[in-house]
Image (cartoon, rainbow, N blue to C red):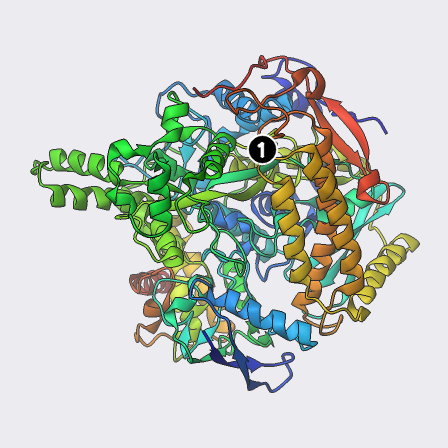
Amino acid sequence: MSLDNKIPQGPIDTKWTDYKDHINLVNPANKRNIDVIVVGTGLAGGSAAATLAELGYNVKAFCYQDSPRRAHSIAAQGGINAAKNYQGDGDSIYRLFYDTVKGGDYRAREANVHRLAEVSVNIIDQCVAQGVPLAREYGGLLDNRSFGGTQVSRTFYAKGQTGQQLLLGAYSAMNRQIGRGKIKMYNRHEMLDVVLVGGKARGIIARNLITGELERHSAHAVVIATGGYGNVFFLSTNAMGSNVTAAWKIHKKGAYFANPCYTQIHPTCIPVTGDHQSKLTLMSESLRNDGRIWVPAKLEDAQAIREGKKKPTDLAEADRDYYLERRYPSFGNLVPRDVASRAAKERCDAGFGVNATGEAVYLDFAAAIDRYGKEQARIHHLDENDAKLVYDLGQKVVENKYGNLFQMYYKIVDEDPYTTPMMIYPAVHYTMGGVWVDYNLMTTIEGCYCIGEANFSDHGANRLGASALMQGLADGYFVLPYTIGNYLADDIRTGKIPTDTPEFDEAEKNVKSLIDHLMSNNGSHSVDYFHKKLGKVMWNNVGMARNAKGLTEAMDEIAAIREDFYKNVKVSGTANSFNQELEKALRVADFLELGELFAKDALHREESCGGHFREEHQTAEGEAQRDDANFAYVAAWEYKGNPREAVLHKEDLVYENIKMVTRSYK
Amino acid sequence: MNLTLKIWRQKNAQDKGQMVDYKIGGIEPDMSFLEMLDVLNNELVEKGDEPVAFDHDCREGICGMCSLFINGEAHGPDRGITTCQLHMRKFKEGDTIYIEPWRAKAFPVIKDLVVDRSSFDRIQHAGGFISVNTSGNTQDANNIPVNKHDADRSFDAATCIGCGACVATCKNSSAMLFVSAKVSQFALLPQGRIEATERVLNMVEAMDNEGFGNCTNTGACEVECPKGISLENIARMNREYLSASIK
């Protein structure tokens, strides 16, 4: 199969408009006869389900949670980008497009990113109309803040809970359609396979997580919107249930999986404390607007802090190394995530880490509290030399901006971040890789679409802050509803898809036999035991820095853990009841395959770019060294029965509108 | 730490259910409450027993999936947090901890500590939205300025995570705090005003139909709410309801 990205001809800034003007439409009477399945109800899936239902299609939406309102998009903190230029600071659609392509280290698809930047403007209008309470200024207009990797203020936000508010907006749009009966919602259901009829996606096999029953659901098209696969590392900022299963199942049925090694390690997470840890908590990147990142300048101070003999506040300004400000003077603490993460690792590897494990740096708000406090004192004609007063006023400002994050930190770490700098360390966060899709967001399976974080197209090798929410909603509200119509226009005479066919029989039989195997396997270890083992291999050998030796070893180790898993996993309970161990086992089985493909992809990509850092390819200063001559392509893998045997297909990335240059934030 | 856990075990919705005792050791103060349950479950699975079912997902206090009545308090003995944010440093060596599901007629038990909160969703289907199509053809977001004070209060109401602690802790199993948070979010914004009458009438009707009790102004919901949703919202909903009823 050739990899046709179906990018429309013409200038970049009119491609999407021209495309929309010429696609096939489905008339409203015919939409009533067409069913669409949407799997996943986060920002992408929720907004898609709502919009497709509004248009008139019959939507069946599935989520594993007890309600769509709990999808993990809800945990996104910092904000959503849009090229509104309300601040008049030079923002534009082109600049958002440019920043995204550059931030992604020139590994994203130009046409998709430009479309994203174009529709970003509508997203804000849409959400405000839905009653999403985005932050306002005193004059009643929307407020903005800046985010890592950009020099303009284009990020809209709702305190540190932007994802929550946007998700509740999409959820409310879904509620309206559920109430009208246009969306049939399947909570606590998990898709375990896709069903192809005549090469087209025509349905899914889902497990009712309460009864354990396997159900057959048919449709004219299937949309996968199940988010990222960061939990392959066991520890990540993802929700515990986030998994790769739906994306992996369609991969096994013919959808190519693109750039799996592009995983974002987010720089500002609460550090790991011990082996019991089940997940990592992110502190929004927006904190880097006001927090200064540092480690002790002297090794002996770092050691004294680790041993509890000194406190960070004991160190004079001159004894601190503000390493981001030192290395990257023009962006300072606002460098993109990949750069900030690697710089933290570099300092900790060199022995300057500040917590017991030596894997933490400080994020310090003292300067911001002082600056804001003095500003407030001047505004209110108070004494700006009164240290206590200035601190109190400044603390209040910081609390207004980030209060919930500081509270979250305090509850987890048991230290007051207003008076003692936060400790942070990079953690697995977002996966830029995912299912390969063309310009229509269709996978290499006809009629099977993939949107949001689950696809690969918009962020390249690194995602800029506040762009995930933008892509999820762009795909769901404004892109897929057009492109899927173009496909469904050919299906107006197809009629209902029956589920009592050999294709459904076969798919259900396969799912059932995997479940039977796991349930009857009388092993001795829990699912978590294997998941944690996989996670350790992934973090140690496929994590923030990778090399050929480690990756080769990882592939063998993952294959061995997989084999051990099928022999020795123990799943208690029964298949036909509510069984969380079985749910986990089915998800981990897929992670154990994805992990190997992930390492294989990282091994083949002999360059460093974005979230993929190969130790063999770095500059003398330790910066990532890209190889555009040989690697300016998307690596799309075709499943061949074993992750190791996956076949590589390349989609060349052509940059007609942005010149590829070395990223510099100095 | 060594602890004794007394946990509600119930096979399914039809089963009667009972408290079962478990001894557990090796618990660190840095562990979250749910991580402590992970340790217990790992031991149970490796022994061949069924692990304790409990709801959880994001484990950072925002998805609203986790629940648990711990020593008689929704989300346990701390304020302003969910169970996933509760850490074992709040307990002492040798403690006995009672762990039960949310108990309310409108939240039937599915298994062990997992309850069905879909009644909350059905209330939202009745009116938890603004009737605007997601076409992107809406007016510019800055065309209708919103008073910052109102926007902030609307946001405060909108931060409800729908966990159900308010219902679980209320002696009447009332859902007034939850429903009023949604009513208030829209009531405070110009975008939501146009259909305020239908919204409050429909949502209150749906709430009553689901079998939630009435509010008797005890205020326990506000105390136990992990997001600090204020009783003011209930007052606002009552005003909205009254004025909608006499229209």
Quadrant showing the N terminus of chain B: bottom left
Residue at which label 1 appears: A611
Residue at horizontal 25 percent and vertical 36 percent from the top: A367
Residue drawn 70% across and 33% down?
Answer: A548
Chain of the residue under label 1: A
Above or below, comparing residue A650 to residue A287 in the picture: above
Q: Is residue A413 above or below residue A314?
A: below
- Residue A351 sits in which quadrant? top left
Can residue A355 be seen in the rendering of this structure? Answer: yes
Q: Residue at x 44, y 31 (%)?
A: A148
Q: Could you tell me which quadrant the C terminus of chain B lies in?
A: bottom left
| Number of residues whose C-alpha sits closer than 10 Å to that of mark 1, classed few (under 14), some (14–19) or many (20 or more) | many
B228 with respect to B113 (left or right): left
In the rendered structure, the answer to whether residue A508 lies left or right of residue A221 reads right
Using the image as rendered, state which of residue A331 and residue A167 is in the foreground.
A331
Relative placement, left or right, of A59 versus B226 is right
Instruction: Give how far across and how far down residue A164 sits, in percent.
Output: 46, 49
Residue reaching furthest right? A502
Q: Regarding mark 1 in the picture, which secondary structure is present there?
A: loop
Left of A432 or right of it: where is A523?
Answer: right
